[in-house]
Image (cartoon, rainbow, N blue to C red):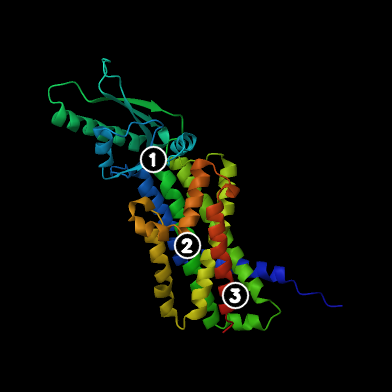
Amino acid sequence: MPKSYSQLRAAFALAKASLLAMLRSPTSIVFSLLFPIIFIIVFGSMVDTTIVPLKISLGQNSDTSNIIYESVKKIKNLTIVTNMPQDEAREALKKGRLTAILRIKKNPVFSQLPPYTILITSSPSSADAGVLLQTLLNNVVGSIDKAAFPSNASVAILHTKELPGRIYRKIDFILPGQLGLSLLMAGVFGSAFLLFNLRQSLVLKRLSATPVKRSYIILGEMLSRLSFHVLSFIIMVGLGYFAFNYTLVNGFLTFFEMLLFSLFGLVIFMGIGFIISGVIQNESSVAPTANTFILPQILLCGLFFPIENYPHGLQAFCNILPLTLFVDGLRKIGFEGAHIWQLPWQVIGLLIWATALSVVAVKLFKWE
C-alpha cells in the first residue's frame, strides 16, 4: 500500500529551500538586516538635542484661573490633559506616556510665600522632557515677573517631585521601529519578488503538478520568512540590549513575547507581498508597486519619530496602519512590560489586517 503524501513535509522542504535562497541573496541581507542594524547603531549613538513634544496632566485641585496657567497653555509644544484620573496619570507618567503631572496651587494671601506654587511630578521615564518642561516653566514665571511684578518677589515658586520609574532611552523608541522595518522589507519585497520569479521560471507550474496544496506552499514560504526573521530579531535585539541598554522589562519573557507578537506582522506583510506578486504582470513593476505600500508605512507609522508630531487630522489615519499597530505593540511589550493579552487595540487591529490580507492573497495566488 503506497504511503500517503505528507503535505507538512513538503511545506518544510519548501521552507528550507526558500530560506537558503534568502541567505544567499545579498538583497535580502542588505534590506532586511543590514539597513535596520545601521539605523539602530546610528540612532542609538545619537544624543537627542531636538525639542520634543511635551504632554502633561493637570493635577487634582489645580488652580486654573490665574495668569500662570494661561501662559502655560500658550507653550506651542505642550499638550495639557485636564480630565485624566490621578491614578491613571501616575501610571502613564511611570511608563513615559506623560512628561509630568502639573499642579498650580494658590498660596494664602498673608503667607511669606509667592502668590503661587507650581508642583511638578516627573519620572525617570521622561527625564529629558522633564528638564525641558522645568526650563519652559521657569521662563514663563520669569516673563510674568518681568511684565507684572518688576519690583516685587516672584509670582511663583517651583517644586519638583520624582516618581520611581525606568529611564526611557532613544533606543527604546528606535529599536521596535527597526524590527518593524526589517519585517516589512523582508515580508513585502522578499515574498513579492520570490513568488514572481518562481512563477516566471515555471517552478510554481511544476509544483502545481505535484500533490502539494497551495495553502502548504504559502505555509512553507511563511516558515522560511519566520526562520529568517527569528535570526534577524535575535541579532537586532541583542545589539540593542548589550550595546545600547535597550529595555527588556521582564528579560527573556519580554523577548519571547515580542517574538511571538511578530507573527502578526509576518502574516500581514507576507500577505501584501503575495498580493503584489499575484497582480503584477512583469518584474519591473514589483518594486514600484511594493513601494506604493511601503513608503507610506515608513513615513507615517512612527519608525523614527512619534506620530504625535503629525497634524491631529493625520494621526487617526496613522494609528490604523498595520505597521503602526505592530510597532506600538512592540514598544509597549518591551518598555512597559505589557503582555500580548493586554494590547486589545493592537491585537484586534492586526488580526483584522491579517485575516483580510490572507484571504485576498490566497484568492489571487497563481500557479503561472
Q: Nearer the viewer, residue 284 or 98?
A: 98
Q: Secondary structure at mark 3?
A: helix
Marks 1 and 2, how far apart at CA = 38 Å
Instruction: Using the rendered image of the protein, determine whether residue 230 is visible from the camera's viewpoint.
Output: no
Marks 2 and 3, how far apart at CA = 19 Å
Label 3 sits on residue: 362
Among the 4 quarters of the image, the one containing residue 93 = top left
Give the number of the disc on residue 184.
2
Q: Secondary structure at mark 2?
A: helix
Residue at x-position 56% and y-position 63%: 352
Label 1 sits on residue: 82
Q: Position of residue 11 (x, y in %)?
A: 66, 69
Q: Nearer the viewer, residue 327 or 199?
A: 327
- Work out which quarter of the rendered image holds the C terminus and state it: bottom right
- Between circles 2 and 3, the one closer to the viewer is 3
Marks 1 and 3, how far apart at CA = 48 Å
Q: Position of residue 200 (x, y in %)?
A: 52, 82
Numbered-mark total: 3
- Between circles 1 and 2, the one closer to the viewer is 1
